Image (cartoon, rainbow, N blue to C red):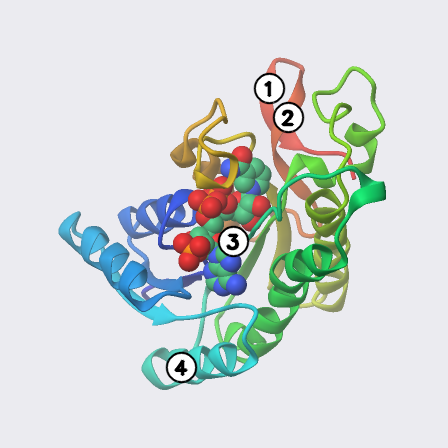
Amino acid sequence: MDTIALITGANKGIGFQTARLLAAAGATVLVGARDRRRGLDAEESLKQAGADARFVQLDVAEEASVRRAAEWVGAEFGRLDVLVNNAGITGGASLPSQTPQDCLRTVFETNVFGVVAVTNAMLPLLRKAPAARIVNVSSGVGSLTWMLDPDSPMWRLTSVPYPASKTALNMVTLMYAKELWETAIKVNAANPGYCATDLNAHSGFLTAEQGAQVVVHLATLPPDGPTGVLWGDLWPAVDGKAEGVVPW
Ligand code: NAP
């Protein structure tokens, strides 16, 4: 049976590379993008690389768009095997004391509320798959442990919207994992590592493809794989391993 995988924010960056890698592994990839032109361009570029790719208009912060996307997936495929909640924004960086409220709201709308909205809309379809996987693309900056470690690269960060949204997303991940504990559905958060994408003006030292490999690992977990973990790029490497379970 074909794997049907929906990736939000799949028109570029880590989302696009995730779609590319999942398609290369044989999945039918549903390319979620809020902008029709950018989504269709991504679909075309994936198809040219031999992928079975379908664009679906999906703005995670727009209720009607999320509902239409779920109806479309249901009508076309009747189920969903993989949901990658990848769409995300940073809202820029500012000192906590100077955080604009509207920025905080906008970032949470996409990075947290959007994930809950899309997951809840897709859950009936995920339940129809034999063993669905949900991957929430989080970040090491959401790790309270790392953020409080003066030796960690996260220590120098002092901004509320993005890190707080990823910490909230980690908790969201745990709660879904717990609700679905007795099912075959696994829900995990991914730390792709610091990847060069538009999100950070390409300052990252990993490629988007390297970040996507972490996401694909969680999207294709075997039945005995974990649920309710934050997994991915490790700082510092543990026992020589650059990837593993990230502390909360
Ligand atoms: P990116 O290249 O800027 O891509 C972000 C994607 O999210 C774009 O496709 C963007 O669409 C989409 N998006 C934003 N708001 C959306 C909305 N309301 N509805 C639907 N799509 C929306 O960034 P990226 O680095 O690949 O980031 C992907 C994910 O990885 C994010 O969740 C980010 O927090 C996470 N992450 C990234 C890094 C890193 O170092 N790059 C590290 C850790 C975690 P448009 O093109 O229309 O704007």
Amino acid on which the number 4 mark rests in the picture: Gly
Whole-angstrom CA distance, mark 1 to mark 4, is 39 Å
Q: Mark 3, mark 4: which one is toward the viewer? A: 3
Q: Is residue 130 above or below residue 141?
A: below
Q: Is mark 3 within 8 Å of ligand 1?
A: yes
Few, some or many residues within 10 Å of mark 3 (<14, 14–19, 20+): many
**What residue did someone put label 1 on?**
241
Q: Viewer-nearest of labels 2 and 4?
A: 2
Q: Which residue is mark 3?
A: 86
Are the two marked residues, 1 and 2, in contact with CB atoms closer than 8 angstroms?
yes
The residue to which callout 2 is attached is 234
Q: Secondary structure at mark 4?
A: loop
- Dot placed on the residue nearer the N-terminal end, 3 or 2: 3
CB at mark 1 closer than 8 A to ligand 1?
A: no
Residue 59 numbered tag: none
Q: Estimate the x, y position of residue 127 in percent, counting from the top left.
A: 56, 75
Q: For the residue marked with disc 2, what is the amino acid?
A: Leu
Secondary structure of the residue carrying numbered label 1:
strand
Looking at the image, tell me whether mark 1 or mark 4 is earlier in sequence order.
4
Q: Residues within 10 Å of mark 2 (few under 14, many from 20)?
A: some
Q: CA distance from mark 2 to mark 4?
A: 37 Å
Which residue is pictured at 70% across the width and 21% down the height? 153
Q: Are circles 3 and 4 on residues that touch, CB within 8 Å?
A: no
- In this image, 234 relative to 128: left or right? right
Between the residue at mark 3 and the residue at mark 2, the CA separation in whole angstroms equals: 19 Å
Dots 3 and 2: beta carbons under 8 Å? no
Left or right of residue 18, residue 243 in this image: right
